[in-house]
Image (spheres, rainbow, N blue to C red):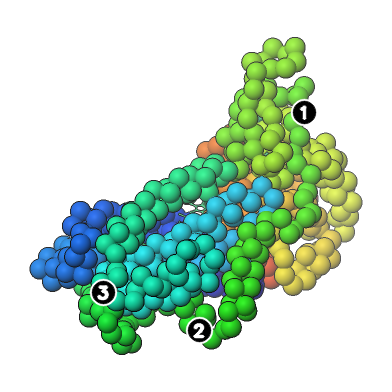
Amino acid sequence: MKKLSLYIEDWANRCFSPRFNPFYYLGAISTLFFIILLISGIYLFIFYRTNSPYQIVQDLTEKQWYLGGIMRSIHRYASDGLIISLLLHTLREYVNGRYSHYRWLAWVSGVILFIISLILGISGYWLVWDQRAQLIALKTSELLNDVPLFIEPPSRSFLSNESLSGMLFFLLHFLHSALPFAMLILIGIHIMRCSRPVLKTPKVITIAVIIMLLMVSVIKPATSAKPADLNRLPLTPPFDWFFFFIYPVKSILSKPIFWSMTTGVIMILFIIPWIKRHRPPVAQVVLENCTGCDQCNKDCPYGAIRLQPRTDRLAYKMEAVIMPERCAACGICVGACDFNAVNLPGMNDVQIKEDIINLLSGIQRIDKKPKILLWVCKQSIRFNGTLDIIKRMTNVKIISLPCIGMIQSEMIEAGFNAGADGIFICSCVMGDCQYRKGNIWLQERLRDKRPPLLNKRVDRRRIREYWMSPVHTTRLVAEIDLFEEELSAYHISGST
Ligand code: HEM
Ligand code: SF4
Ligand code: SF4
């Protein structure tokens, strides 16, 4: 599953470039659809009347086709778009394992958002009160008949036109208008553990989505079926699978199987974050080194660091504190700190620098090949035996990190000081960091756009960045060979 998703994303990278790959913006695309739904929904809300729902919608579609009709169609297609983007967003977070531990809040609020989106879609169709609405009203009430909460079976409300209550439309209308506001609050909760959440799609994607919605709205405007008539059974009205999939499932399964399956699936979705138990140890602050500069807090992708007034006698005002329940153990704060004041247990800066010296001193210069220190992120090299091939390269030594954003500028200098001729940094494609920001922050640090800056004396030509999809791991060997050739050409290899 993971491999398949990577191949699809890699294909999208080739078509759109990683900067505009829609798969890297599924949260933002969902937000975009939500905003479009809010705007078009407010327009429809202004005209909607609960006493003559069918006629009002029909008038909007026919008499005001140039705006009301277009708004209605956009509202319809954006709701389908939201379900597609939510499905993909959920699948992507799942296959990337981004649901457990500190992400439980995003996951659980996401599941609730998904369920509310489905309810909104169904209630939206219902508000039109055509034959399709009649069918889903009947099917939904049959579903609700099984819930032992109602004094009278809800399907009784749909026995005849006379038994149909205006109150029901009022309630539906209220539900359909109030739930989006509940969603707004939930979206706030959903992203509260992501610092700098990507809520905005790049302009190109926004324009493409709007043009696509406008095009389908013009080519195939949303229309109503015949008016609902409870004295007749609805003939086969058009069916929207994005929202109504539950009804055919219910009709083919027996009542006990259907309900145990539905509650089972919902329960599993809610408890998924707690199924995966292993959690790596979280980051720790070395207080005596901390100057309270705030850079770790600025770089932490999950808002897991806060600054508090100093608790020791050092002359700085503030000190960094890790909030363990939010920490992803990505190590990005290690790379952000210029004072070695934050560490991951078992991987502190002293150990890493010792490893660098030991690894590089172990290289024999028999074949005069340049000594290369290869930094990789554990997420980027997953498949095939590429690492084994590289391990057999006598002049290349590997250090593997939980996220590439953990590299400190000092660690790069330590590599050169320990005799490396070149530093090769390999990690995931921009936009696709398991911890959201690791590769972006490192690239900015290397390009002097983000502190801590790399020492000016370091020869940038001896550093190679390689951002790749894990499906291209085999290309890594060829890239390293190329780097070797370039290093030799600069006359900066060990032979000089
Ligand atoms: C209207 C519905 C939703 C909207 C608008 C939305 C939007 C977003 C946004 C903007 C982010 C931050 C992306 C980033 O900056 O890295 C995000 C993250 C996330 N979303 Fe959603 N989302 C929605 C529904 C869902 C659903 C249904 C799920 C899954 C059940 C889900 C799971 C997640 C997870 C796990 C993250 C955290 C990713 C991480 O920690 O790296 N979301 N979402
Ligand atoms: S970056 Fe380092 S020195 Fe600055 S506040 Fe964070 S831990 Fe302290
Ligand atoms: S390890 Fe990652 S999530 Fe934890 S505090 Fe550091 S940057 Fe934040």
Callout 2 amino acid: Ser
Callout 1 amino acid: Val
* Place of residue 488 in the rendered image (x, y in percent of width and height, measured from the top left): 70, 56
* Place of residue 303 in the rendered image (x, y in percent of width and height, measured from the top left): 60, 38
* Place of residue 213 in the rendered image (x, y in percent of width and height, measured from the top left): 29, 67
Residue tagged 2:
251
Q: Earlier in the sequence, mark 1 or mark 2?
A: 2
Residue tagged 3:
161
Image quarter where ligand 2 lies: top right
Residue at image position (75%, 42%) is: 282
Q: Between marks 3 and 2, how big is the CA–CA gap? A: 25 Å
Callout 3 amino acid: Asn
Eyeballing the image, is 271 above or below 290? Answer: below
Residue at image position (52%, 62%) is: 149
Horizontal side of 276 relative to 440 (left or right) equals right
Q: Are marks 1 and 3 in contact (CB under 8 Å)?
A: no
Mark 1 lies within 8 Å of ligand 2 (Cβ measured):
yes
Residue tagged 1:
286
SS category of the residue bearing label 2? helix
Of residues 109 and 313, the one drawn nearer to the viewer in this rendering: 109
Quarter residue 364 falls in: bottom right
